[in-house]
Image (spheres, grey):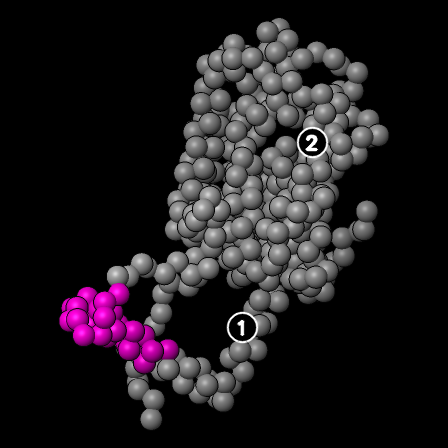
């Protein structure tokens, strides 16, 4: 483990019914008029951009901003986070950015106050690691309260809470095909998840569902009080206001596609790599047995499950809303919409 250094403190065109030149069609005249306005607007934009290029290094400034970008993926355990992170590792050399794993002692998602300060300083001041992609099992940390002017971009993926718990339960006992020789904490325990729930075991208790909410809520003590309504509300607030994009495990490819379209500096080529790469689907929990309907029904009686499931549904609805405004479906495949806005009525007019 490397010690942490301490720096100096396809365009979706609208379908049109074309008519012959001899026919008079008001809609066609309006369409042509709009086309002329767009052409004029684009010409004016180009002239303004040229003036700014002559007046100062506007383009270089934009480039520097991109090179200063930092992404934090505070990955929730057992949400396909390894599959997604492998893509970042595979692309970093080609797309020229750095990937760093945040390795906390015993995978503790809550940092001490002094480590929070160190972490924030590293992220913002470690220029040699920019642009950078940081990932680790760490709960959300609000950079603004440390006086940081430019905050990192947060992304994450969450999963159906019961499916995530089942996967984690068997992972602790049997591991996965990513590192099959590694001994896991509960290795040797052959009890199924159904048997655990029937017996009221601690590893499958409803309290173990309380994880995705606190990961999004953050480092406040109330975030980790199991069943806290305040924590769920804060997690929802952070998801909407502090995260660039939150996907779901069940629709991971769409999540990757949106990231590639919006942040190509990091994710150019990610969708194709996910579809065809050998590492994308590498990590699978072994010996996993699906729970029975009776087991699921018993867990769903818990208020903790109801809150975690409400948060999951909230995240899923938000993700599907973003996707609906970014992609279109054609012949069963999704494709990203091209730019669908332009500038006009630009003043003052150029001489």
Q: Secondary structure at mark 2?
A: loop
Q: Nearer the viewer, residue 186 or 338?
A: 338
Q: What's the distance in space between the residues labelled 1 and 2, CA to CA?
A: 41 Å
Residue assigned mark 2? 284
Q: State yes or no: residue 58 in magenta.
A: no
The quarter of the picture where residue 129 lies is bottom right
Q: Nearer the viewer, residue 226 or 28?
A: 28
In the rendered structure, which segment of residues is drawn in magenta? 18-42
Disc number for residue 214 = none
Disc number for residue 62 = 1
Q: Furthest-bottom residue in view? A: 351
Which of the image's four quarters has the C terminus?
Answer: bottom left
On the question of residue 11 being in view, the answer is yes
Q: Which badge, 1 or 2, is on the more N-terminal residue?
A: 1
Q: Secondary structure at mark 1?
A: helix
Q: Furthest-right residue in view? A: 181
């Amino acid at each position: 483990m490397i010690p942490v250094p301490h720096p100096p403190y396809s365009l979706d065109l609208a379908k049109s019914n074309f008519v012959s030149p001899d026919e008079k069609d008001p809609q066609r005249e309006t369409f042509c008029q709009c086309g002329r306005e767009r052409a004029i607007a684009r010409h004016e934009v180009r002239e303004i951009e040229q003036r700014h290029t002559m007046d100062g290094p506007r383009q270089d400034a934009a480039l520097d901003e991109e090179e200063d970008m930092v992404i934090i993926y505070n990955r929730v355990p057992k949400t396909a986070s390894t599959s997604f992170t492998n893509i970042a590792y595979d692309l970093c050399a080609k797309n020229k950015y750095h990937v760093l794993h945040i390795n906390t002692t015993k995978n503790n998602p809550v940092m001490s106050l002094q480590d929070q300060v160190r972490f924030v300083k590293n992220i913002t001041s470690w220029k040699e690691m920019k642009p950078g992609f940081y990932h680790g099992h760490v709960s959300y940390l609000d950079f603004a309260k440390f006086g940081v002017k430019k905050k990192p971009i947060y992304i994450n993926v969450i999963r159906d809470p019961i499916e995530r718990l089942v996967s984690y339960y068997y992972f602790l006992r049997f591991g996965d095909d990513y590192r099959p020789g590694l001994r896991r904490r509960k290795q040797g325990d052959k009890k199924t998840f159904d048997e655990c729930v029937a017996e009221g075991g601690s590893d499958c208790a409803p309290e173990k569902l309380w994880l995705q909410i606190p990961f999004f809520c953050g480092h406040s003590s109330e975030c980790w009080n199991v069943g806290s309504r305040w924590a769920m509300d804060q997690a929802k607030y952070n998801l909407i206001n502090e995260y660039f994009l939150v996907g779901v495990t069940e629709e991971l490819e769409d999540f990757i596609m949106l990231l590639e379209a919006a942040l190509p500096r990091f994710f150019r080529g990610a969708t194709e790599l996910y579809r065809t790469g050998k590492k994308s689907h590498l990590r699978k929990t072994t010996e996993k047995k699906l729970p029975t309907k009776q087991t699921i029904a018993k867990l769903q009686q818990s208020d903790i499950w109801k809150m975690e499931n409400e948060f999951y549904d909230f995240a899923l609805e938000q993700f599907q809303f973003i996707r609906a405004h970014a992609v279109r479906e054609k012949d069963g495949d999704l494709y990203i919409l091209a730019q669908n806005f332009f500038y006009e009525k630009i003043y003052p007019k150029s001489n």
